[in-house]
């Protein structure tokens, strides 16, 4: 479906017409966009290793991340993968001494949790490093929100970026939100609950689809600490 198709189906569900626009296109598109973003948050879509890079600047360690990135998974300098440091690690100095040579000034590690929306590199790039592009492998939202009139950046009303079989997930989310309004004429708690259940079914199937696409398998087993021997 295109964005226009999704909006049309949502209006049919809500029985909204141009004569009786109880919610209006702006609000409904906002709910559709929110639904697609939440689908990505809940399922793991979308993994991207091509669209996001960082260009090194001499002496600069902090770089602003695009706001469509949910989580940075890996950072690469060419084919070399940089190490990852987190605030929960004991000491940065220990991390360096164990993993990387302290004598080198080329960035060898990265950190996402030091400041919100920022990627921090260790160590600071030198003049020789300046201009080098690091490639990010990220978990992200769709690159273009459904509220954007040009959602694919090519001047067309393109399809949402999530797989086509899940395009109705944002529709049910939007219907749930619209029917949850605290207004006598708009609110319908029974129908809202039904659409929330449909939404949750799409989430369940979406998680399974994502796991299968990435050849992942969830395994649950007791900790060996509690195993009786």
Image (cartoon, rainbow, N blue to C red):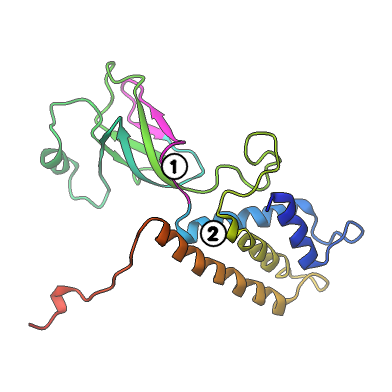
Q: Is residue 118 visible?
A: yes
Circle 1 Cα neighbour tier, 10 Å, few/some/many (<14 / 14–19 / ≥20): some
Residue 31's tag is: none
- Residue 81 image position (x, y, % from top left): 26, 37
Q: Nearer the viewer, residue 193 or 166?
A: 166
* Left or right for 201, reference 193: left
For the C terminus, which image quadrant?
bottom left
Residue at the spot of label 2: 39
The quarter of the displayed image where residue 80 is located: top left
Q: Is residue 166 above or below residue 147?
A: below
User: Which residues are drawn in magenta?
Assistant: 46-63
Sequence-wise first label, 1 or 2: 2
- Residue 51 image position (x, y, % from top left): 46, 36
Q: Is residue 75 above or below residue 73?
A: above
The quarter of the displayed image where residue 84 is located: top left
Extreme-bottom residue of the structure = 228
Q: How far apart are labels 1 and 2 at the CA level?
A: 21 Å
Q: Nearer the viewer, residue 211 or 197?
A: 211
């Amino acid at each position: 479906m295109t964005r226009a198709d999704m909006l049309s189906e949502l209006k049919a569900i809500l029985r909204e017409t141009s004569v009786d626009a109880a919610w209006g296109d702006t609000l409904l598109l906002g709910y559709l966009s929110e639904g697609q973003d939440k689908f990505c948050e809940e399922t793991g879509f979308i993994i991207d290793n091509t669209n996001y890079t960082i260009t090194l600047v001499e002496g600069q360690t902090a770089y602003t991340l695009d706001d469509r990135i949910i989580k940075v998974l890996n950072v690469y300098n060419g084919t070399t993968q940089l190490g990852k440091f987190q605030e929960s690690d004991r000491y940065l100095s220990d991390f360096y001494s164990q993993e990387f040579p302290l004598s080198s000034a080329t960035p060898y590690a990265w950190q996402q949790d030091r400041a919100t929306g920022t990627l921090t590199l260790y160590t600071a790039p030198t003049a020789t490093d300046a201009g080098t592009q690091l490639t990010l492998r990220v978990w992200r939202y769709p690159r273009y929100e459904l509220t954007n009139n040009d959602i694919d950046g090519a001047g067309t009303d393109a399809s949402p970026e999530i797989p086509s079989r899940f395009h109705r997930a944002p529709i049910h989310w939007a219907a749930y939100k619209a029917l949850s309004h605290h207004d006598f004429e708009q609110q319908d708690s029974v129908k809202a609950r039904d659409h929330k259940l449909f939404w949750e079914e799409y989430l369940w199937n979406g998680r399974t689809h994502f796991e299968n696409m990435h050849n992942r398998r969830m395994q649950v087993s007791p900790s060996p600490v509690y195993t009786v021997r």
